[in-house]
Amino acid sequence: MAAKVLHFGPDVCHRLPVLSRVGYDVEICPSLVEFPPLLQRAYPDAVLVTDRPNSEHRHSERHQVIAFTREHSQARLILFDSSYSVSDEEDFDLVIPPLIGPEEWLRQIAAVIERSRALNAASAATRKHSTLVVMDAQITRLKSIIARERSAATRAKAQRAIDQIGRRSDPSDK
């Protein structure tokens, strides 16, 4: 299955045609206003962020893209860094420094997406297993309730029988 990526920011290094040529399904997000609905509609494997050079709002935009992606998506965050000083590097799953050749950043992106897909598959399996365990626990609880009700009914019946025998053999009743 082809990986789907959502690109935010200018493509000053013309990476998007390279991604498309090697089989990525590339969605382009031209503005911050369009980012939330596009992210929720596209279900990308990764969000690629390229800084807007010389923009006074670039850190604010980047922070908003990071926050919205982390809150509303399982997509990996990848930064195409335009400088060698990234202050929020830890917020990204991958930071691609300037002047890295396409073969290298393509390999790195593919590795991040593959790891993410493996984690998502393992997470889905864990959620499915957890659902089955919860269902099993609910069934066991219901069986326990039924067994306690039967036991209570059997005890009540036995107590009534004991009470009847006790009344028949009680000499004070004669």
Image: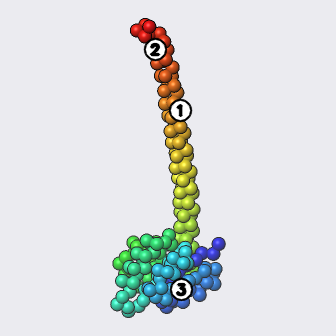
Q: How far apart are labels 1 and 2 at the CA level?
A: 26 Å
Seen at 49% across and 89% down, the residue is 30
Q: Nearer the viewer, mark 3 or mark 2?
A: 2
Residue 96 seen by the camera: no
Residue occupied by mark 2: 167
Marks 1 and 3 sit apart, C-alpha to C-alpha, by 64 Å
Q: Earlier in the sequence, mark 1 or mark 2?
A: 1
Q: CA distance from mark 3 to mark 2?
A: 89 Å
Q: Is residue 60 left or right of residue 136?
A: left
User: Which residue carries the number 3 mark?
Assistant: 28
Q: Nearer the viewer, residue 24 or 6?
A: 6
Q: Position of residue 105 (x, y in %)?
A: 53, 78
Return the disc, 1 or 3, that comes first in the chain's sequence. Answer: 3
Confirm or deny contact between disc 1 and disc 3 (CB under 8 A). no
102 and 125: which one is in front?
125
Q: Secondary structure at mark 1?
A: helix
> Of the residues tagged 1 and 3, which is closer to the observer?
1
Q: Quadrant of residue 111?
A: bottom right
Percent from the top left, x then y, of residue 113?
Answer: 55, 71
Query: Which three-letter amino acid code belongs to the residue tagged 2?
Result: Arg
Q: Residues within 10 Å of mark 1 (few under 14, many from 20)?
A: few
Name the quarter where the N terminus is drawn.
bottom right
Mark 1 vs mark 2: in front: 2
Instruction: Check whether the beta carbons of the residues at disc 3 and disc 2 lie within 8 A of each other.
Output: no
Query: Amino acid type of disc 1?
Result: Arg
Q: Quickly name the residue at label 1.
A: 150
Task: Label 2, secondary structure: give it.
Answer: helix
- Residue lying at 50% horizontally and 86% vertically, measured from the top left: 29
